[in-house]
Image (cartoon, rainbow, N blue to C red):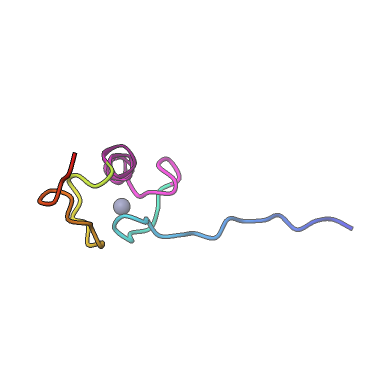
Amino acid sequence: MTEPVRLRPKRPCPICSKPSAQKYHPFCSSRCAQIDLNRWFGGNYAIPVEEDEPDEGENREE
Ligand SMILES: [Zn+2]
């Protein structure tokens, strides 16, 4: 019994939802790949975050 070849389902670019390019999988372009990288490295800068953030800036006790 032969196993069927598993084709990866084509997933859209997680950044802009365009069809991903094989070269930049899973992104559509180097630009989107870079954006994703920046997310990881930059954390929450350059990207608007809408999470519950504690008000550490004003009530800082040290
Ligand atoms: Zn993209």
What residue is shown at x 33% (from left), y 40% (from top)? 37
Query: Which sits in the foreground, 55 or 34?
Result: 55
Residue at the farthest front position: 62
Is residue 60 found left or right of 15 in the rendered image?
left
Residue 39, located in which quarter of the rendered image? top left
Q: Position of residue 7 (x, y in %)?
A: 62, 56
Is residue 62 found left or right of 11 in the rendered image?
left
Q: Position of residue 17 (x, y in %)?
A: 33, 61
Residue at the farthest left position: 58
Residue at the farthest right position: 1
Q: Position of residue 30 (x, y in %)?
A: 31, 40
| Count of numbered badges drawn on the protein | 0
Q: Where, quadrant-wise, is the N terminus in this rendering?
A: bottom right
What residue is shown at x 29% (from left), y 46% (from top)? 32
Q: Is residue 61 magenta?
A: no
Is residue 19 found left or right of 60 in the rendered image?
right
What residue is shown at x 43% (from left), y 49% (from top)? 26
Query: Which sits in the foreground, 19 or 35?
Result: 35
Compared to residue 20, the image places residue 40 above or below, namely above
Magenta span main SS: helix
Residue 40, located in which quarter of the rendered image? top left
Q: Where, quadrant-wise, is the C terminus in this rendering?
A: top left
Compared to residue 25, the image places residue 54 above or below, namely below
Is residue 52 found left or right of 20 in the rendered image?
left
Residue range (magenta): 22-42
Q: Position of residue 11 (x, y in %)?
A: 46, 59
